[in-house]
């Protein structure tokens, strides 16, 4: 295993800058997910790690070894692509065995042990003699995973491997990835634009935007305390609400609360202030409660597991709430909206600056 150290990394394609002055350390033995919208630089960063692209400036190190002068074949990196490269005339176990046969230090018994191990983890023992053409897309991708991890590379890279897999097979594939990472503890970098995959698989998530890592954190921390409005919006379905806020008389006012709020670490009161709150922390009641405000229900839509996303209007501000089951209010009705201040964060000019301490006395 090896940690990946990125120092002052920049990659330009003509006038376009894909990666901008990036510094990061991806710990050895962990799964790091590169998450972000299309075009944010995820795949470019991965291609530089494996050696398929050269940095414009900066360095990539595996532990203390500078990779700048090494071609891909000498970096000891395994890789799984969106479209796996399989040998159609070989069986499942023969495809997995190929990179092992190139390692002359391995005995035949060790090669057989590694093949059996990955087949067990991927639940493919009964498919070991099948040819690749006999498999569905999800199973072919599992073979690609098995082949990459069986090598015991220092690092294994996954480039959106579930993109071209149907939904049921995708769930099975994600489960297989999870088992692989738990059992083998290799250093893994997993590129995805799917937040569910990232939150399920990762030890840490590197959220990217415009060629930069804007937050690198554990999945729960990234979701619960996003460092920027972009992170709060991008994570979650729907993402965070960001109604406006203002300071008056040393207290904070927002359409989400009938009572003024006390904020920690306010500092300079200037800039564009907004409250960040997750839709699942917005509650709706028939009667007023401490700090609640009236809200008009504009729309509601059912999501998975019988949950509803409710769109509300509060003083001309649109707020999303997520409820367990159908709300007791119809479209056009007025409900009382309440958010506990403990679930609110304060953002200035798109950056989180503190949390809310409660209602003002």
Image (cartoon, grey):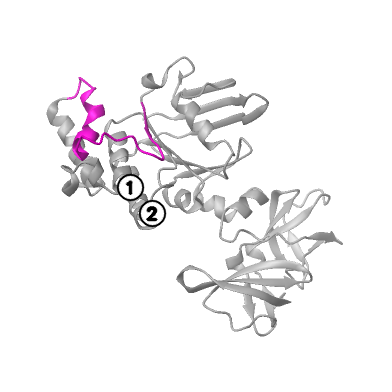
Q: Is residue 184 left or right of residue 40?
A: left
The furthest residue to the top: 69
Q: Quadrant of residue 207?
A: top right
> Residue 79: percent from the left, percent from the top?
38, 33
The furthest residue to the left: 109
Q: Dot 2, crowdedness within 10 Å: few (<14), some or many (≥20)?
A: few
Residue carrying label 2: 166
Position above or below: 152 against 138: above
Image point 47% across, 51% down: which residue? 199
Q: Is residue 289 visible?
A: no
Q: Dot 1, crowdedness within 10 Å: few (<14), some or many (≥20)?
A: some
> Residue 162: percent from the left, percent from the top?
41, 47
Q: CA distance from mark 2 to mark 1?
A: 8 Å
Residue 87 among those drawn in magenta: yes
The furthest residue to the right: 249
Please say if the residues under marks 2 and 1 sit with CB atoms less than 8 Å apart: yes
Q: Is residue 148 visible?
A: yes
> Residue 1: percent from the left, percent from the top?
36, 30
> Residue 19: percent from the left, percent from the top?
60, 30
Image point 69% across, 60% down: which residue? 356
Q: Quadrant of residue 28?
A: top left
Mark 2 or mark 1: which comes first in sequence? 1
Task: Pick the quarter of the image with the C terminus.
Answer: bottom right
Which type of secondary structure does the marked residue at label 2 adopt? loop
Residue 146 among those drawn in magenta: no
Q: Nearer the viewer, residue 286 or 238?
A: 238
Region of the chain picked out in magenta, as a range: 77-106
Residue carrying label 1: 137
Q: Is residue 13 left or right of residue 204?
A: right
Image point 65% across, 29% down: which residue? 16
Which type of secondary structure does the marked residue at label 1 adopt? helix
Q: Is residue 111 left or right of residue 275?
A: left
């Amino acid at each position: 295993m090896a940690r990946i150290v990125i120092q002052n990394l920049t990659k330009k394609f003509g006038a376009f800058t894909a990666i901008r002055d990036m510094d990061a350390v991806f710990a050895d033995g962990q799964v790091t997910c590169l998450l972000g919208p299309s075009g944010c630089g995820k795949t470019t960063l991965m291609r530089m790690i494996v050696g398929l692209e050269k940095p414009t400036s900066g360095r990539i190190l595996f532990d203390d070894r500078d990779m700048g002068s090494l071609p891909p074949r000498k970096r000891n990196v395994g890789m799984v692509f969106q479209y796996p490269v399989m040998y159609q005339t070989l069986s499942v176990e023969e495809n997995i065995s190929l990179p092992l046969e190139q390692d002359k230090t391995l005995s035949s018994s060790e090669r057989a042990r590694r093949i059996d191990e990955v087949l067990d983890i991927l639940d493919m023992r009964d498919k070991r003699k099948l040819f690749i053409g006999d498999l569905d897309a999800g199973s072919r991708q599992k073979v690609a995973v098995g082949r990459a991890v069986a090598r015991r590379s220092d690092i294994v890279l996954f480039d959106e491997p579930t993109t071209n897999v149907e939904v049921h097979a995708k769930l099975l594939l994600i489960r297989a990835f999870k088992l692989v990472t738990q059992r083998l503890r290799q250093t893994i970098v997993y590129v995805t634009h799917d937040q569910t995959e990232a939150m399920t698989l990762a030890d840490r998530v590197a959220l990217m935007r415009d060629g930069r890592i804007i937050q690198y954190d554990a999945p729960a921390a990234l979701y619960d305390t996003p460092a920027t409005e972009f992170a709060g919006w991008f994570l979650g379905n729907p993402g965070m609400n960001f109604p406006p806020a203002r300071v008056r008389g040393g207290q904070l006012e927002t359409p989400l609360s009938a009572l003024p709020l006390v904020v920690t670490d306010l500092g300079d009161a200037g800039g564009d202030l907004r409250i960040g709150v997750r839709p699942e922390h917005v509650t709706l009641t028939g009667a007023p409660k401490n700090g609640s405000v009236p809200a008009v229900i504009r729309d509601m839509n059912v999501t998975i597991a019988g949950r509803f996303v409710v769109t509300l209007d509060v003083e001309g501000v649109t707020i999303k709430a997520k409820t367990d089951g159908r709300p007791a209010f119809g479209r056009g009705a007025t409900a009382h909206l309440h958010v506990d201040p403990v679930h609110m964060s304060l953002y200035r000019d798109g950056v989180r600056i503190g949390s809310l301490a409660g209602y003002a006395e």
